[in-house]
C-alpha cells in the first residue's frame, strides 16, 4: 500500500515499528457490545516491564532503538454515531465536527495551506468555543495519507528530521499513544512561534488539538480514540524521541480494562474528528488528552486503503482565564 505522509510519521518511528516484543493477548474483552456497529478489535499497548519504567529513548537514525515491548489487547470499540451530542473536548477529549470543506483533492500542498488551513482554524475556534480577538490558533503540522504517493509531501512547520521523509511506513499508526507529553508541550510553542510572542502566549491556557478528516469514507483501518475520562494519568508513560538537534516526547499507554474505546462507523469526509492532545489547564476538570490508535476492523480488511488528512494545531486562550475566574 503506497501512502503519502507528511513528517509526522517518520518523525515518530517508535510508533510505527512492526517488530514488537513480549506480546500478550487478552481474549475476553471486559466490556460488552451494545450497538450493531460496536466491534471487538485488537489494540497494541505498551507492555510494562514490571517496574513501571518508561521505554528507553528512541534515537533517530538508529532503528534498533525503535522497538517497544507491546501488549496486544482485544477491546470493545463503541460506535458513537447517534451520540455525537454527548461528546466534547472538555469531557471525552474529542468530538465530531460536521463540516464540508472546499478542498476535495488534498494533493496540492499550497492549496491545502491556502484553502484548508483557514477552514481548520475557524473550526477549532468554534469547536473549542474560543473568544475571537483574544485567542489564537496556529497550525504547525499536517499529515496526508493518500494514494498514490506524491513526489513531495513537505509541510509547513514539519517535524521531520528523517533523511528520507517521503518513504515513511505506509500503514496507519497501530500503537496506542498521545502525540505530546505534558512536559514537552511548551517546547512546541517555543519551536513554532516567534520568540518575542512566546512569553505572552504561555502566560495563559494553551492546548494542542488535532483535526482528523477522511478524504473518502473510512471503512478500513478506522481511527479509534479513548474516552479521556476512562484513562487516568497513571496509564501514561513518557516516550522520548531524540533528534540530532532536540528531544521530543510523546506518551505511550499501558493497558487498562476500563478504557472506553470509541470510533465513528463509516466516518465520512464531512465528519471531522477533533481531539485534544494536550491542555495546560489542570484545575477545572477538563480532559487534557485522548489516547488514540488506528485498528483493524475485520469486516473491511479487503477494502481499499484509507485516505485521510490530520492537522495539528496550537490553541491559545491568553485572556480566557481572566474571563472564567
Image: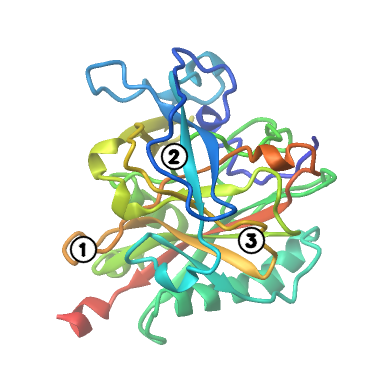
- Judging from the image, what secondary structure is the residue with disc 3 in? strand
Q: How far is mark 1 from mark 2, CA to CA?
A: 21 Å
Number of other residues with Cα within 10 Å of mark 3, as a class: few under 14, some 14 to 19, many 20 or more:
many
Q: Earlier in the sequence, mark 1 or mark 2?
A: 2
Q: For the residues labelled 3 and 2, say whether their Cβ atoms are less than 8 Å apart.
A: no
Taking the image as shown, residue 319 lies to the left or right of residue 138, namely: left
- The location of residue 106, given as percent across then percent down, is 77, 61
- The location of residue 200, given as percent across then percent down, is 28, 70
Quadrant of the image occupied by residue 10 = top right
**To which residue does mark 1 refer?**
285
Which residue does the image show at 34% across and 31% down from the upper left? 254
Number of other residues with Cα within 10 Å of mark 2, as a class: few under 14, some 14 to 19, many 20 or more:
many
Task: Note whether 76 is above or below 94 in the view shown.
Answer: above
**To which residue does mark 2 refer?**
177
- Judging from the image, what secondary structure is the residue with disc 1 in? loop
Q: Is residue 97 visible?
A: yes
- The location of residue 306, given as percent across then percent down, is 73, 47
In the foreground, 235 or 112: 235
Taking the image as shown, residue 139 lies to the left or right of residue 28, namely: right
In the foreground, 192 or 57: 57
In what quadrant of the picture does the C terminus appear? bottom left
Q: Is residue 195 visible?
A: no
- The location of residue 172, given as percent across then percent down, is 64, 39
Label ID, residue 213? 3
In what quadrant of the picture does the N terminus appear? top right
Q: For the residues labelled 1 and 3, say whether their Cβ atoms are less than 8 Å apart.
A: no
Q: How many marks?
A: 3
Q: Earlier in the sequence, mark 1 or mark 3?
A: 3
Task: Note whether 48 is above or below 6 in the view shown.
Answer: above
- Judging from the image, what secondary structure is the residue with disc 2 in? strand
Taking the image as shown, residue 4 lies to the left or right of residue 99, namely: right
Amino acid at each position: 500500500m503506497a501512502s503519502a505522509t507528511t513528517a509526522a510519521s517518520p518523525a515518530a518511528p517508535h510508533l510505527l515499528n512492526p517488530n514488537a516484543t513480549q506480546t500478550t493477548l487478552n481474549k475476553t474483552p471486559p466490556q460488552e457490545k451494545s450497538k450493531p456497529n460496536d466491534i471487538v478489535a485488537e489494540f497494541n499497548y505498551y507492555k510494562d516491564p514490571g517496574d513501571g519504567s518508561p521505554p528507553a529513548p528512541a534515537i533517530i537514525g538508529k532503528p534498533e532503538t525503535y522497538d517497544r515491548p507491546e501488549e496486544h489487547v482485544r477491546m470493545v470499540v463503541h460506535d458513537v454515531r447517534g451520540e455525537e451530542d454527548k461528546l466534547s473536548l472538555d469531557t471525552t477529549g474529542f468530538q465530531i465536527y460536521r463540516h464540508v470543506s472546499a478542498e476535495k483533492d488534498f494533493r496540492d500542498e499550497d492549496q491545502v495551506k491556502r484553502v484548508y488551513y483557514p477552514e481548520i482554524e475557524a473550526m477549532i475556534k468554534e469547536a473549542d468555543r474560543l473568544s475571537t480577538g483574544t485567542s489564537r490558533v496556529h497550525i504547525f503540522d499536517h499529515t496526508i495519507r493518500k494514494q498514490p504517493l506524491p513526489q513531495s509531501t513537505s509541510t509547513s512547520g514539519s517535524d521531520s528530521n528523517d533523511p528520507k521523509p517521503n518513504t515513511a511506513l505506509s500503514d496507519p499508526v497501530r500503537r496506542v499513544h498521545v502525540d505530546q507529553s505534558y512536559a514537552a508541550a511548551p517546547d512546541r510553542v517555543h519551536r513554532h512561534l516567534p520568540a518575542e510572542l512566546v512569553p505572552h502566549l504561555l502566560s495563559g491556557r494553551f492546548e494542542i488539538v488535532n483535526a482528523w478528516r477522511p478524504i473518502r469514507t473510512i471503512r478500513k483501518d478506522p481511527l479509534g480514540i479513548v474516552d479521556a475520562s476512562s484513562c487516568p494519568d497513571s496509564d501514561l508513560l513518557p516516550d522520548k524521541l531524540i533528534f540530532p538537534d532536540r528531544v521530543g516526547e510523546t506518551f505511550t499507554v499501558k493497558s487498562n480494562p476500563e478504557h472506553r474505546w470509541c470510533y465513528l462507523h463509516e466516518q465520512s469526509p464531512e465528519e471531522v474528528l477533533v481531539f485534544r492532545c494536550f491542555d495546560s489547564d489542570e484545575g477545572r476538570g477538563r480532559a487534557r488528552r485522548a489516547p488514540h490508535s488506528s485498528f483493524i476492523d475485520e469486516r473491511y480488511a479487503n477494502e481499499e486503503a484509507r485516505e485521510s488528512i490530520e492537522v495539528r494545531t496550537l490553541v491559545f486562550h491568553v485572556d480566557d482565564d481572566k474571563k472564567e475566574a
